[in-house]
Image (cartoon, rainbow, N blue to C red):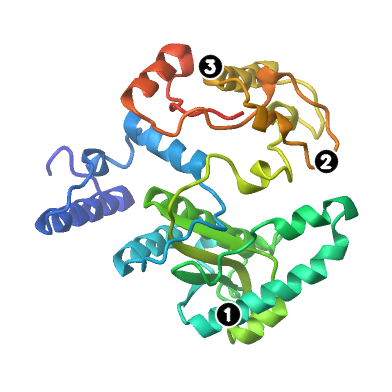
Amino acid sequence: MIPSQKTGLAGIVIRMVRRVTSIAIARGQAMPENMTDSIADAFSQTARDAVYRALFTRRDVRSHFLPDALDDEVLARLLLAAHHAPSVGFMQPWNFIVIRDAARRAEVRDLFLAAREQELPAIEEERQALYRKLKLEGICESALNICITCDRQRSKGSPLGRWHNPEMDLYSTVCAVQNFWLAARAEGVGVGWVSIIETQALKRLLAIPDHVMPIAYLCVGRVSEFAPKPDLETHGWGRRLPLPELIMSETFCGQGEARLKSAVAHLNSDAVEPASPADQRVAPAVSQREPPKEESALSLSSLNFDDASASRASQAGSGTWPAIVLK
């Protein structure tokens, strides 16, 4: 046996990656060199930076959709990423309803508009005007829609991981949504999750059986840009909570983990730029203690991820942390 050859699951994955690489080369497509690394190896700095970039620049896209069609090969990659999400008991409870028909999407948008009017009275009166101005969907503007569902009978015969937590199939499906979303960001594809839809009405429109639960209705398509900050933050609906205040030790509200919290603050302060006047005008969504600036987690200081910024981050002592920080 060749020393580098492996058996078992790792070997299967490595052979699959090499097969995909050979197909790509045959088609004249360039594959990143680190895609052929062993599954057990740590990612290179460039690969780590790319993962963190996808995480921190992912946006819930409601506008900026382009009229361009989305290539089926790109969509296939996104769905394959979703299908490789973690699932408790390896139940894989998801299905993906691809919705292209303009008339059907117009009906879904009508469901959204009706649900928004139902939701409005629950919004604080002083915020209702802002709520009405917010762009909360791109159902008809995006290239296509996808409804990701959870089949709650798929693992009916197996209690593995669900005996005490029967909702784990729902959580597993949410992991598939996240995989899809992050892969889409890496492909330059915008995704918007429309949650303001009455579930039963959507099930009737899409002929979803009783035992299947729609988890996410997504607007998907090419976009002209990805906003530097979440839309709801930009429009003053809320701000990202400071991470150190969310870290607890041993028990809920347990005090401690000072070194960990300091490390979080260090990551933020290494490259945080002074807040612009626009940032300073953003009011918190709820009353909360304003943290010191150096602990105020999480906004982007760089969207470029160039070599120079990566080098600066490394020199600042961030180690594997990419050239992007939370504020």
Circle 3 Cα neighbour tier, 10 Å, few/some/many (<14 / 14–19 / ≥20): some
Residue visible at 54% across and 57% down? 63
**Position in image of residue 234 (x %, y %):** 64, 42
252 relative position to 166: left or right: right
Label number found at residue 217: none
**Position in image of residue 113 (x %, y %):** 70, 73
Task: Residue type at mark 3: give it.
Answer: Asp
State the residue position of label 2.
Answer: 286
**Position in image of residue 194 (x %, y %):** 62, 64
N-terminal-most mark, 1 or 3: 1
Residue 229, quarter of picture: top right
Give the distance between the C-alpha atoms of the residues marked 3 and 2, in whole angstroms.
Answer: 28 Å
Label number found at residue 270: 3
Circle 1 Cα neighbour tier, 10 Å, few/some/many (<14 / 14–19 / ≥20): few
Residue 225 visible, this angle: yes
N-terminal-most mark, 3 or 2: 3
Give the distance between the C-alpha atoms of the residues marked 1 and 3, in whole angstroms.
Answer: 47 Å
Q: Check the picture and name the quadrant holding the C terminus.
A: top right
